[in-house]
Image (spheres, grey):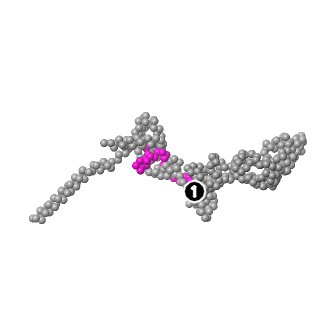
Amino acid sequence: MRKIKIAISVLTVLILGLTFQGCKNDGSSEPEAALNQETIPNTVTLSEEALRTAGIKVEPVQFRPAVKKIRVVGDLQFNAKRYAHITSRTSGRIEDILAFPGDKVNQGQPLLHLYSPDFLSLQAELVQASERRNRLKGDDGEQATARALFDSVKRKLSLLNVTDEDLAEIEKSRTIRPLLAVRAPFSGSLIEGSAVAGDYVELGRSLFKIADLSSLWACVHIYEKDLPWVRPGSRVIIRVGALPGEEFRGSLLLVGDVVDEKTRTIEGRVEVPNLPGKLKPGMYVEADIFSPVERKVLFVPQAAVQDYENKKIVFVRGGENTFFIREVTLGGASDGMVEIVDGLKEGESVVSGGSFLLKSEMLKKSLGEEKP
């Protein structure tokens, strides 16, 4: 009998304990649920006046080709298409020098004057041939021969870089010019100069090197693993250490045909406009080559994305004055656009201008809801 009473007492204690525990859980469930409840509003609504003054700009979410960015290094070189070695086209004596290394010159500008016996004799032949051609105008048989002789002398003088205007003036005035002008073939900067006044020069003697620095080539080294992604025409952004924070844009002109056995890279050639003249041949460069890949992803403007509590959110237009708050997952970014991995669908419209104001309104509404 005593054992039965002890068992009944133990069972009673256990029942009372379980009942007390259940009451305790029921009393705390509501506060815990209240703490976990989402306090951020789901929408933001603006008045007509606020919408007009906020400068809200809405853009659609679109599929665009994804872009792969490839980082390369290299150096700047002269644009070989705008780089020339000026040599003497005849023998003679340098009488005076009109331009020096470092000078900027224009196309056709005289760089030096050369006293050349060949130039003098060719001018005399031109004057004689012109007079003979004019004298034989009535004789058809002799006229053709005279014209051919005249054209032959003109071609010889043209090979000395004598301009058509100078040829016409010599023919008209019948005056022999004592000095031959060596002229710049195009506008640019004189890089080197080996001419000295008074020197006697032979045919082919080096006089100047000239380069048009308004356009340079960046020769970059592309790893062979990246070759499937690069192709001529790809967009390139150039950076140089001497100009931190500045970017220069160009396009990939050429991808080479031979892989360097030591570096396992292939040379790529990028044409870079240099109108401000800040870039200098020989500078070390870092470059990003942007190449479209064979897939499309959703993109929105970077200005559409806002940060909130370690999350990325956007404002999706739901009505004329109403905007839904949507959390998104981002991918890569380029050219002011950012990839949307998750959270949006094509065709939805997001706020790209004025989204910061909507975020402020969202915070005001959230704080207002938290007040007792």
* Residue closer to the observer: 346 or 59: 59
The region drawn magenta spans 287-315
Q: How many marks?
A: 1
Q: Residue at x 14, y 63 (%)?
A: 7
Question: Which quadrant is home to the C terminus?
Answer: top left
Indicate whether residue 294 is drawn in magenta.
yes
Left-right relation of 333 to 39: right
Residue situated furthest top in the rendering: 49
Left-right relation of 151 to 297: right
* Residue closer to the observer: 348 or 301: 301
Please provide percent x and percent y for residue 311: 42, 50
Please provide percent x and percent y for residue 147: 85, 45
Q: Inspect the image, locate mark 1, and give the three-letter code of the amino acid beneath it.
A: Val
Q: Is residue 306 above or below residue 53?
A: below
Question: Which quadrant is home to the N terminus?
Answer: bottom left
Indicate whether residue 116 is drawn in magenta.
no
* Residue closer to the observer: 234 or 28: 28
The residue to which callout 1 is attached is 72
- The 10 Å Cα crowd at callout 1, few under 14, some 14 to 19, many 20 or more, is some
- Looking at the magenta stretch, what is its main secondary structure? strand
The residue tagged with tag 1: helix, strand or loop?
Answer: strand
Please provide percent x and percent y for residue 246: 57, 49
